Amino acid sequence: MSTVPDKALQPSEINGVKKSPKPTTVVHEKTQHIADLITSGSLSATRPKRYPTSKRLHSLDTDDEFNKCFTKKTRRVELPAFAYNREIPVVHDMESTRFKVRTKNLKTSSFTEESVSREAILANVCGYNPHQRTLCYTSDDTPSFHNTDIKNNIIDPKIISRMSKLKNRNIDSSPENVLDAPLMKDDFYLNLLSWSKKNVVAIGLDTVVYLWNADNEDITVLKHDAKDQINSLSWSEDGECLAVGSGDGKTLLYDINANEKVRTMAGQEDGVGALSWHKHILSSGANKTVFDRDVRMKQPTVRELHGHSGPVCGLSWNSDGRMLASGGADNLVNVWDNRKTKSIFSIDTHTSAVKALAWCPWNHNLLATGGGKDDKKINFWRINTKTRTQTIQCDSPITSIHWSRHFRQFVSTHGHPQNHVTVWDYPSLDKVKEIPAHDSRILHSHLSPDGQVLATASPDENLKFWRIFTNTGEPELVENEFQIPKKKATPKIPVIR
């Protein structure tokens, strides 16, 4: 029985044009077979969701799933098994790492126990504790074939030798020599002791200047007018001339070979309490002023420095002669450039008079300053940066400071109540030795020309000599010896236009 097709399914005529019916779909045998598989559930009808290669690599749990990846052309490609690991694993952890990647969601305890036991066996055989291996690459029992001493690898052997000798050397607590010094004035603001390059010690006792030759122990009395009060003494750098600061503002020069006065320079108020030489320039400090004089000139005064409001009791040139430090009873320290008349750096941190001033011989910009009885501090200053680097709080006033030229050490002398001599390491500031030196405060001190023996004078009427820095043939320290050398500046090449 034939059926009449629905009119809606028949060809229609639109605007006089007949519309052809859809072609009849012909099912191919192979296509029919795939449809049967889908119907039976053996094959999924939906196309698998595709991800970028990077996402698929991290989403695979097993090697089989990982290695069976399809490209855009649906061609199966076998990838290397190690492609998922972008870093080189540590050797002793490689197996456990691969195990964790492959079996991300599996719980297997047998392999873990086996790995732990294997690691314990290896640790036992190799002799190390696996729980204490942080940044440790050799065991304590493993012989080293390399020199692990950092000092020997980095620092010059000469410096190592010097440091070892420094640690082993002994400082005697007893003086090498003691001389009588009667009628020593008990005045903190005077400087009555100086030791020349020719090994002659000058000391002022009352109105007399005595010269003691340390080589032959001969004593000479300087032909000095007894009317002139003695406030300060200082030898020239060559040891041929002795400068004497008087109580009436005059500075006197004596020829030591002829033992006679050769010059008198006046002009300052009150007593000249401090003197310091640099080559032919003599600086003298009096009340509120410092005069620089060129002793070769007929009119010697070349500069007047005004920076203090009280007597100047300390003066010191640095070793290269570029800067002069002055300390006063007004608790101030002024640093002067040799080309200027105004202080380039003023230090007001001390709370007492500053008499102790010392420039470091191996660093021309390092200055040590020591305060009096109300301060008792030693401060260290970098003049080029105008900063204080370190401070020592002492238990007695500081009367003088001296740097060693052969060791990274310095010595300080003190007043009441300890009256001691103290040796310090620098820059650690460790106390190396403390010597009870006098029965009264130490007012004056000076190092010998070879930098080994310290002479100290006190109102207890004793002049004592202490061997502080014993030199065993080491060369003197020089500027920047312990610093990294600076790169040489590239010379500028002129451009011809």
Image (tube, helix red, strand yellow):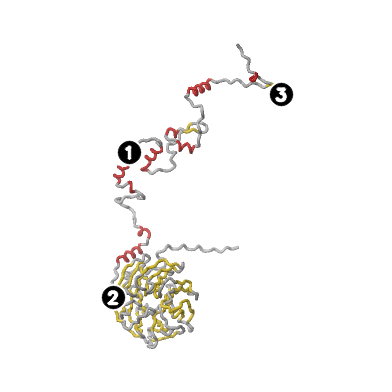
Secondary element under disc 1, as helix, strand or loop, is helix
How many marks can you see? 3
Q: Amino acid at mark 2?
A: Glu
- Could you say which is closer to the camera, residue 92 or residue 204? 204
Q: Which residue is mark 2?
A: 176
**Residue at position x 33%, y 67% in the image:** 431
Of callouts 3 and 1, the N-terminal one: 3
Q: Which residue is mark 1?
A: 113
**Residue at position x 51%, y 27% in the image:** 45
Q: Which x, y percent locates residue 306? A: 48, 78
Q: Nearer the viewer, mark 3 or mark 2?
A: 3
Q: Is residue 301 left or right of residue 469?
A: right
Secondary element under disc 2, as helix, strand or loop, is loop
Q: Which x, y percent locates residue 299? A: 49, 83
- Taking the image as drawn, is residue 489 in sight? yes
**Residue at position x 32%, y 38% in the image:** 113
Q: Which residue is mark 3?
A: 15
